[in-house]
Amino acid sequence: MRDPKWPWVARQQWENLLFLHWPVPVEELRPYVPSPFNIETYNGTAWISIVPFQASWNGFRGMPGKLPFSDFLEVNVRTYVNFYGESGVYFLSLDTDSRLAAAGARGAFSLPYLKAEIKLEETEDGLFYESRRTEEAAREAYFSVFIKHPVSPEMDTKKGSLTEWLTERYCLWTLKGDKILKGAVSHSPWKLKKGEADWSMTGMTSFLSGTGISGEPLIHYCKEKRVGFHPFEKYGIADVSFNELWHPGSE
């Protein structure tokens, strides 16, 4: 992957981050990923992931403290793409309990942020997330997950493994109108733990038909990760072709 054009300008800490991954047929995803982006596969199979986490310590480079009222919870749905050989993620939806974060990222970068009520509880037994979408005129969506303690010891991601392929991604790809944008992030390599979880959801992946997602997900957990955000880079103009009949923010 090409190095970012500019240094990172903003920081964030991700806490109590979960990855829940499911294999999905490529043809199920293709209508919902803009045509400039190639859907990546691992051994011939595409993947979709749901990622709940807490964002904290938001601030700008050189800022000693954090921005006030900037901590929030998020649950995103993503898949894995590349553009001219640069691998990254493509977000299908991003639910957050921060109206400011939703409006800012949606307006500036056309990322599909939606307002939701999200709670996070940590007990002696484990970690619990619950999210219910509240955005007006948006499709209803609910997600909950409880990951049990203890989880496995931390592990390095083995080069070439499915875990590395799913998690060691350092940019997102998106469209703003017909503009192709890349948003790069910087952080240290993941040290993940495997976990077992009870989960339920409705509406989070309702765009999938056919087989959709099924079975138990592959689950990873990370207590915290500090990241830096680089300015978005414009990569050209797209001849957009994808299914605009479905969008998480429309009925």
Image: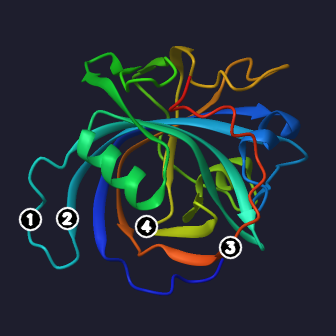
Task: Give the class, few, some or many, for how many residues have Cα within 10 Å of label 4's Cα (few <14, many ≥20).
Answer: few
Say which label, 2 or 4, has the lower sequence index. 2
In contact (CB < 8 Å): disc 2 and disc 3? no
In contact (CB < 8 Å): disc 1 and disc 2? yes
Name the residue tied to disc 1. 65
Q: How far is the residue under mark 1 from the one under mark 4?
A: 19 Å
Q: How far is the residue under mark 2 from the one under mark 4?
A: 15 Å
Q: Is residue 75 above or below residue 223?
A: above
Which residue is located at x 43 percent, y 86 percent?
6
Q: Which label number is shown at residue 237?
A: 3
User: In the displayed structure, does residue 69 sit left or right of residue 216?
Assistant: left
Mark 4 residue type: His
Q: How far is the residue under mark 2 from the one under mark 3?
A: 31 Å
Which residue is located at x 76 percent, y 47 percent?
242
Q: Is residue 188 above or below residue 191?
A: below
Say which label, 3 or 1, has the lower sequence index. 1
Name the residue tied to disc 4. 187
Quadrant housing residue 48: top right
Say which label, 4 or 3, has the lower sequence index. 4
Residue 28 at x, y percent in the picture: 82, 33
Q: Is residue 167 above or below residue 134?
A: below
Instruction: Look at the numbered disc 2 and give the secondary structure of its residue.
Output: strand
Say which label, 1 or 2, has the lower sequence index. 2
In contact (CB < 8 Å): disc 4 and disc 3? no
Judge whether residue 14 can be spotted in this image.
no
Residue 30 at x, y percent in the picture: 81, 43
Name the residue tied to disc 2. 59
Mark 3 residue type: Ile
